């Protein structure tokens, strides 16, 4: 189940994002940014647009003074914006938890080993280790997940915090970009938008699973989607992710995508 949000709004606050929530090297994980902002909107469906790279361990400002909007600033620079929206997805036939377990690629060494979502250099309690793989016979990627108390910041039997649910959704679903050659191996893509609908929150210590699928590629823009499901194959959350392939020679931190 998912409790009704108790949203306190109308404030601007200084925040600092811990390096614990790193995604690509030296940058905040996009899913964490989405979760950080979405919880300040009274909506089960939130779109977060990531406009600029968000650095860690520096003073930022979270702004909730505009109705139905949340903004994140670095000084006068707008980094990210969140707003309530609607989300409709054509969800493929759901796989089983066992199929998701078979698809998992936890032995994979990742390109960003310190990523909170999928990094292979993290300890079991310091990361989520959501390294998904292709599902046999389906145009899907998937992985099972048993949320660990220390990793998600909640006790066994409690609900996974909503911020952590959105954080967890990016990496395992992003692997769908590799299906059908949608993204070339040498290309680097960054999350530009994340739209998520949360129906219910998973329970810490209880098995659940992610599955993701490709939608389309238009130029440098890649659209994919996915779900988080409980062990009864019920959809707990769904999301649509927009990635942007960087131009050749452009780094993650510097320059325009």
Image: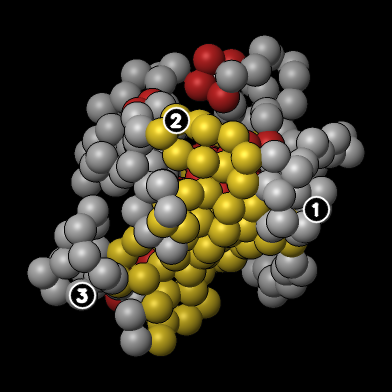
Q: Quadrant of the N terminus?
A: top right
- Which mark sits nearer the N-terminus, 1 or 2? 2
Q: Is residue 228 above or below residue 221?
A: above
Instruction: Kindly report the distance in space between the C-alpha atoms of the residues bearing marks 3 and 1.
Output: 35 Å
Tag shown at residue 247: 3
Q: Residue furthest front?
A: 76
Q: Which residue is mark 2?
A: 16
Mark 3 or mark 2, which has the lower sequence index? Answer: 2
| View extreme (right): residue | 4
Distance from disc 3 to disc 2, alpha carbons, whole Å, reads 30 Å
Q: Which residue is mark 1?
A: 43
Using the image, determine if residue 15 lies above or below residue 172.
Answer: above
Q: Residue 38's x, y, as percent?
A: 66, 47
Q: Quadrant of residue 158?
A: top right
| Disc nearer the start of the sequence (3/1) | 1
Find numbered disc 1 in the image and state the secondary structure of the residue it sits on. Answer: loop
Do the residues under discs 1 and 2 have CB atoms within 8 angstroms? no
The image shows residue 40, relative to residue 66, as above or below, that is: above
Which callout, 1 or 2, points to the residue nearer the camera?
2
């Amino acid at each position: 189940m998912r409790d009704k949000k108790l949203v306190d709004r109308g404030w601007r606050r200084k925040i600092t994002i811990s390096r614990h929530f790193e995604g690509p090297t030296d940058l905040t994980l996009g899913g964490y940014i989405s979760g950080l902002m979405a919880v300040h909107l009274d909506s089960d469906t939130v779109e977060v647009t990531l406009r600029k790279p968000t650095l860690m361990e520096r003073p930022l400002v979270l702004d909730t003074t505009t109705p139905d909007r949340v903004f994140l600033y670095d000084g006068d620079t707008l980094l990210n914006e969140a707003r309530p929206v609607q989300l409709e997805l054509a969800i493929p036939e759901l796989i089983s938890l066992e199929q998701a377990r078979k698809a998992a690629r936890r032995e994979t060494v990742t390109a960003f080993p310190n990523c909170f979502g999928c990094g292979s250099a993290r300890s079991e309690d310091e990361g989520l280790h959501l390294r998904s793989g292709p599902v046999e016979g389906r145009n899907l990627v998937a992985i099972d997940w048993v949320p660990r108390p220390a990793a998600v910041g909640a006790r066994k039997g409690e609900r996974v915090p909503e911020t952590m649910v959105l954080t967890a959704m990016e990496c395992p679903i992003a692997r769908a970009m590799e299906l059908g050659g949608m993204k070339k191996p040498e290309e680097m893509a960054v999350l530009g938008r994340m739209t998520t609908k949360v129906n219910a929150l998973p329970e810490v210590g209880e098995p659940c699973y992610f599955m993701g699928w490709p939608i389309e590629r238009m130029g440098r823009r890649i659209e994919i989607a996915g779900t988080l499901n409980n062990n009864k194959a019920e959809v707990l959350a769904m999301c649509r992710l927009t990635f942007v392939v960087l131009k050749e020679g452009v780094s993650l931190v510097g320059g325009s995508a």
